[in-house]
Image (cartoon, helix red, strand yellow):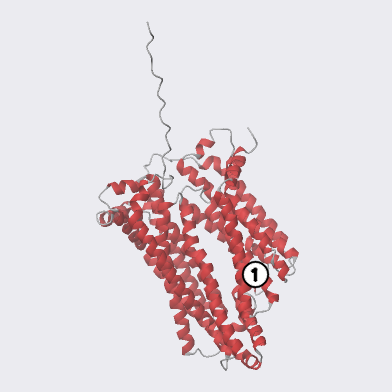
Amino acid sequence: MNFLPIVSRELRVAARRRGTFWLRVAAATTAVVIGGGFVLLNQVTGAPMANLGSHLFDVLTWLCLAAGLAAGLFLTSDCLSEEKREGTLGLLFLTDLQGYDVALGKLLATSLRGFYALLAVLPILAITLLLGAITGAQYWESALALINALFLSLAAGLAVSAVSRDSQRALTGTLFVVLLLALGGPLADTIIAGAKNSNFQPLWSLSSPAYVLTAASTQGRAAYWQALAVTHLIGWALLALACSLVPYSWQDRRRGGRSITGSWAYAWRYGGTRRRRTLRRKLLDLHPVTWLACRERWQSQGVWIMALLAVGGLVTVLVEMQAREGWIMWSYFGKLFTLILYLWTASQACRFFVEARRSGLLELLLASPVSGGQIVRGQWRALLRMFGLPVALLVGVHFVGSALAQLGYQRMFSQASTVTMAALTNRTSTATSQTFAVSSTVVVSTKAGTNATPALARFQGPTTPGQVVMALLGAFATGAETLANLAALCWFGMWMGLTSRTANLATLKTVLFVQVIPWFVIAFGTGMVVMGLFAGLMAGRSFAQPAAWVAWWPLLNALLSAGAEVAKDIGFIAWSRNKLYTSLRQQAACGFGQPRFVVPPRMAPPVLPPPIVPALQ
């Protein structure tokens, strides 16, 4: 047998897929569009060209880091667990294959697309070298950090998939491991530095791929190579763990003589006997599909845990942090919780229809008196029943945090406008544009968590009613946007679950089409409108205090983004509802994994035997 036969076969198969080519094209096109958008925004605002290269480099590298860390969630977290569910993984071990053959084959087959996509972005990232403010060493070290982060994420997903059987649990476990590796170390070092009243010292941060990328862009990069080596060794350790667990974790083991319904795992998943009986009596006759989707009680426990953590974080900020930078940092942690909630919602919305098609349950339901509309409404009611209350709690916490963060921004910009008002009113239009560019840089550095935030945020003074009104309006816009996004993810996720082969693929398409791609378009559009408006006002000096209008930046940005997001979500909801109600039976009629339209092969005409001529006597 050849060395690593599965690796060679999977690489040949992955290289011939159309998705491998189109993903490279999409990654390069996205980088070009983002770069062109930055150049256009720079021309509109009149900002100096000296900072364009560094800002574009930071945005592209951090977007590549986020995409690389997300690769393990959607590419490798279900590659081995899917084989376990289908019963094909054990067939491979009937041969003389080893665990590393299977694990490395799956890793290379799934990572080829992600690596090619990253490779397509790197030449576009190198254009920032021509714009200035970026050194060659910084570029190559950042590129090496991005490749290492991609490898670490893929290895983490493979290790979690080796011990999992359910796709959603594998996705959740991979998300937890990736977040722990990316954020756990820096948070631990920050807490240690705060407890000791000392400077930040990277110790646990050496295991974070995010810190590796940060160290590549920092002067005096003493800890870059140490952090790169530590994260790389963690990736190889996770890969070795997956190789050692695969030969033993694919078997179904039944311990003791207890029945499946009496085991603790079954009780953890579906609840006790009383809970199952009560739920069956309440929902089975009224909404049978809702009962089917609500039986697993652990599905909502993750959202409840996230909601309670959010409440605890809000209470901690209210009690401990009185400075404005605390609320500004809270807004970004709130966005992280919201992003995790979006991912969880998309996964839950897709899961029921994927599993129903795979097991044949959907065909059985359609053969019963239950109609297609009742199936769709039952799944929607199940999502509301399981996640309505914790999601409402999360949205409420996010509303309060957003209002206080908006208030912090208003007071921060009020101080900035008070300090720079005299300079702005006495300068020419060119100097005004440059000052606006500096103000924009302050906003970017505040979001990045630099030292500019405490100097501006500690504004001691009364809060005006106008600032409170603007903060409440921004918080209402953020809450409406969050609710609309969740509804769109649910409806579009149900349609993707009905038309996709795997749950992870359906989740990826849902998050990509509903959130990621529209977010780029809306962020660019709103940024163009707001920055163009402010640049025009400040360059024309139409007002006595042009810098005071910068305080409207968070509110206008939130209102425009929320309006565009809600309009987008209404379109997704209407389209998905129409497809679900009109095409559910047609999609269920197609076998799982079969194409939607099957053209029968053209049959050759039958060949008749030659006639038998009787011989003449």
Label 1: how many residues lie within 10 Å, few (<14), some (14-19) or many (20+)?
many
Q: With 117 as the anchor, is 516 left or right in this view?
A: left
Q: With 221 as the anchor, is 592 left or right in this view?
A: left
Q: Position of residue 117 (x, y in %)?
A: 61, 56
Count of marks placed on residues: 1
Q: For the view shown, which residue lies furthest in the top direction?
A: 617
Residue under the point 71% across and 70% down:
131
Q: Position of residue 519 (x, y in %)?
A: 51, 68
Task: Please name whichever residue, 482 or 579, is drawn nearer the observer in this view of the structure.
Answer: 579
Q: Secondary structure at mark 1?
A: helix
Q: With 366 as the anchor, is 453 left or right in this view?
A: right
Q: Position of residue 392 (x, y in %)?
A: 39, 69
Q: Position of residue 363 (x, y in %)?
A: 33, 46
The kind of residue tagged 1 is: Leu
- Answer whether residue 187 is visible to the viewer in this image: no
Task: Please name whichever residue, 611 or 545, is drawn nearer the observer in this view of the structure.
Answer: 611
| Residue wearing tag 1 | 56
- Answer whether residue 32 is visible to the viewer in this image: yes
Q: Quadrant of residue 581?
A: bottom left
User: Image quadrant for the N terminus?
Assistant: top right
The correct choice, above or below, for 259 with respect to 400 in the image is above
Residue under the point 47% across and 88% down:
466
User: Image quadrant for the C terminus?
Assistant: top left
Task: Please name whichever residue, 517 or 447, is drawn nearer the observer in this view of the structure.
Answer: 517
The correct choice, above or below, for 388 with respect to 327 in the image is above
Q: Quadrant of residue 569?
A: bottom left
Q: For the view shown, which residue lies furthest in the front direction?
A: 616
